[in-house]
Amino acid sequence: MFLKQYETGRTFVAKLDFGSDLLEELNKICVQEYINAGYIQVIGAVSSLKYGFFDQDIKEYIYTTYAYDESLEIVSCSGNVSVKDGKPFCHVHICAADKKGKCVGGHLVAGTSVYAAEVVIQEILGEDLIRELDDTTKLTLWK
Ligand code: ZN
């Protein structure tokens, strides 16, 4: 098990621009504000959605793109911030619903277009939180 203790740092609140890329904007905030560890929560809506599913058998991500001509509600979108390849890295999962309430989601990747997004990022302070390739899972995990 991996267990470390952190203290609460700065809290950031952001409203993302219409048409911006959800994951890229989250990463941009963390780089700009030097947030090396923290957690993320987002609510709002997207006009297109791209996410990955990690296939544990082949140890690769399979990507799916949903592009509706109507917005999808972000039902849940949360993640964390750590350091990967020497810079802040947001690991975010998203679940979004269409107008019938049908939800899709997974591991958020670049390619998701913001319709409206309200973001809270909570920085945590303590030992470096570094992400590296894990030999067993082939995922980049905290070490
Ligand atoms: Zn993930």
Image (cartoon, rainbow, N blue to C red):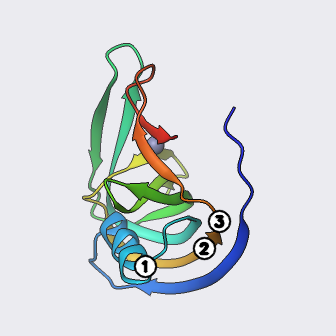
Task: Give the residue furthest to the front.
Answer: 127
Question: What x and y, as percent, mark residue 47?
Answer: 32, 66
Picture quadrant where residue 31 is located: bottom left
Q: Nearer the viewer, mark 1 or mark 2?
A: 2
Nearer to us of marks 1 and 3 is: 3
Badge nearest the viewer, 3 or 2: 3
Residue type at the position of mark 2:
Glu
Instruction: Indicate if the residue with disc 2 has its beta carbon within 8 Å of ligand 1.
Output: no
Can the viewer see residue 106 in this picture?
Answer: no
Q: Is residue 77 above or below residue 28?
A: above
Q: Which quadrant would residue 10 be assigned to in this image?
A: bottom right
Question: How dense is the environment of label 3, judged by Cα within 10 Å: few (below 14), some, or many (20 and up)?
Answer: few
Q: Nearer the viewer, residue 124 or 73?
A: 124
Picture coordinates of residue 34, whole percent (x, y)? 44, 78
- Residues at discs 1 and 2 in contact (Cβ within 8 Å): no
Q: Is residue 100 left or right of residue 53?
A: right
Residue to which mark 2 is pinned: 123
Q: Residue at x 49, y 55 (%)?
A: 96
Residue that numbered label 3 is attached to: 126
> Under tag 2, what secondary structure?
strand
Residue 13: x and y, percent? 56, 85
Judged from the image, the secondary structure of the residue bearing numbered disc 3 is loop
What amino acid is found at the position of numbered circle 1 in the picture?
Ala
The numbered disc on residue 116 is: 1
Residue 72 versus residue 118: which sits nearer the camera? 118
Q: Circle 2: is it few (<14), some (14-19), or many (20+) Cα within 10 Å?
A: many
